[in-house]
Image (cartoon, coloured by chain):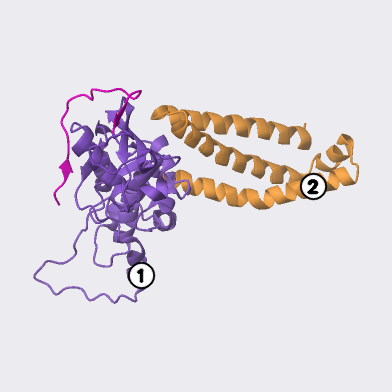
Chain colours: A orange, B purple
């Protein structure tokens, strides 16, 4: 890991911390109030706020996780060179793609 | 600093299944019975090898280096190991004793012996030359990679810099400067084991002392060097280096300092 990846991973963690706390509060609220999937969708559909919130969350998690996968592959998988960066970009794009697709589904789809 | 590597390249005659040395009935050094001997398994060979077991008389205030020396002088002169000062100054005699890297000259047998047995191996994370002697070249190459050499900003014709021991930078240096390059931290580090590019605790600790040296002019290159793939950001803060350092240094804290300093430099656009 170099200083650029290190900084990106720390910044993405910094972004995720308040978002995770908010996410947990939402989960507790939804379960305690007994909200159904329909109730949740009624709140998220067309909501710019929830869309932005979870899109940012997904992008931060994709950056953070992809850099982490790169470190695991380097240290435990003994992977080196260009393959490491290909794996990192691949993991990041897959995470971002799956996450943004889910955000799209609950906000727009 | 002179160093001694005992023994020759001759292969050990015995295998690990055979115990050589003092027996309870009779020993070469006298006054030995079963309760006063220890079983010592010593690594023989190179990176590929095996443990060979010896029985060594136990003495008062005996160090692990004394045990190794006894084996070489009395039981098997082909055993190779490295030592110089025997008093914890030179850093030559570090080995893995019962799974932990230690200075053998400053480790009393009574403190580490387990069920009357010692297992002595070369330092981990370094190529083995023979038996207990490792090749320290990769360790010192990391020093070079981390720009661990002082870059003067004045010539010897100019006055010596006046640095108060009370300045914050000097205090930071004081906390990290006593490293004698024994390689114990390098051997104890998980990240060194996992990542061959990683510079390791000693080299980065050295870089940190120079980063804080107000007389040094090499920080642009140094901060760049320790910001690359094998640099300070690979450290996972396991703190094995601090746990094992025989001098009681905390290289993890030095590495954390480098992480902060390089990240600040990166954000300011100062890293080329």
| Residue at 72%, 33% in the rendered image | A102
In the drawing, does residue B135 fall left or right of residue A85? Answer: left
| Residue at 65%, 44% in the rendered image | A56
In the drawing, does residue B62 fall left or right of residue A52? Answer: left
| Residue at 86%, 35% in the rendered image | A37
Q: Is residue B3 magenta?
A: yes
Q: Which mark is residue A26?
A: 2
Q: Is residue B60 above or below residue B57?
A: below
Dominant secondary structure of the magenta stretch? loop
The x and y percentages for residue A48 are: 75, 45
The x and y percentages for residue B127 are: 28, 33
The x and y percentages for residue B190 are: 43, 40
Q: Is residue B23 above or below residue B227?
A: above
For disc 1, the chain is: B
Q: Secondary structure under badge 1? A: helix
Q: Secondary structure under badge 2? A: helix
**Magenta-colored span:** B1-21
Q: Circle 1 is placed at which residue position?
A: B171
Which of the two residues, A19 or B109, is positioned nearer the viewer here?
A: B109
The x and y percentages for residue B3 are: 16, 46
Q: Quadrant for residue B27, please give it.
A: top left
């Amino acid at each position: 890991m170099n200083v650029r990846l290190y900084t990106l991973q720390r910044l993405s963690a910094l972004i995720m911390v308040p978002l995770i706390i908010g996410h947990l509060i939402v989960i507790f609220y939804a379960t305690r109030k007994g909200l159904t999937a329909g109730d949740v969708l009624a709140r998220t559909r067309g909501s710019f706020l929830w869309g932005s919130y979870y899109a940012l969350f997904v992008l931060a998690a994709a950056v953070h996780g992809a850099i982490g996968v790169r470190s695991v592959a380097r240290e435990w998988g003994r992977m080196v060179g260009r393959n490491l960066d290909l794996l990192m970009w691949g993991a990041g794009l897959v995470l971002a793609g799956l996450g943004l697709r889910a955000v799209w589904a609950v906000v727009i789809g | 600093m002179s160093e001694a590597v005992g023994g020759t390249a001759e292969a050990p005659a015995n295998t690990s299944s055979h115990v050589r040395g003092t027996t309870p009935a009779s020993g070469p050094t006298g006054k030995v019975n079963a309760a006063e001997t220890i079983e010592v398994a010593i690594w023989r060979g190179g990176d590929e090898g095996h443990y060979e077991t010896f029985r060594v008389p136990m003495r008062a205030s005996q160090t692990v280096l004394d045990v190794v020396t006894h084996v070489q002088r009395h039981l098997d002169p082909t055993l190779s190991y490295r030592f110089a000062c025997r008093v914890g100054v030179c850093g030559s005699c570090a080995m893995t004793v019962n799974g932990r890297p230690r200075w053998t000259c400053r480790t009393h047998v009574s403190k580490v012996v387990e069920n009357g047995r010692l297992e002595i191996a070369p330092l981990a994370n370094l190529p083995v030359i023979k038996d207990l002697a490792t090749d320290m070249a990769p360790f010192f190459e990391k020093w070079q990679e981390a720009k661990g050499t002082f870059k003067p900003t004045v010539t010897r014709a100019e006055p010596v810099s006046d640095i108060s021991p009370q300045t914050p930078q000097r205090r930071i240096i004081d906390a990290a400067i006593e490293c004698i390059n024994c390689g114990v931290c390098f051997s104890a580090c998980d990240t060194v084991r996992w990542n061959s590019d990683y510079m390791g605790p000693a080299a980065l600790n050295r870089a940190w002392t120079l980063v804080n040296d107000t007389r040094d002019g090499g920080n642009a290159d140094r901060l760049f060097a320790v910001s690359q793939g094998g640099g300070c950001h690979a450290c996972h803060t396991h703190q094995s280096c601090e746990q094992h350092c025989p001098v009681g240094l905390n290289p993890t804290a030095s590495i954390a300092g480098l992480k902060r300093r390089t990240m600040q430099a990166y954000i300011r656009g100062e890293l080329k």
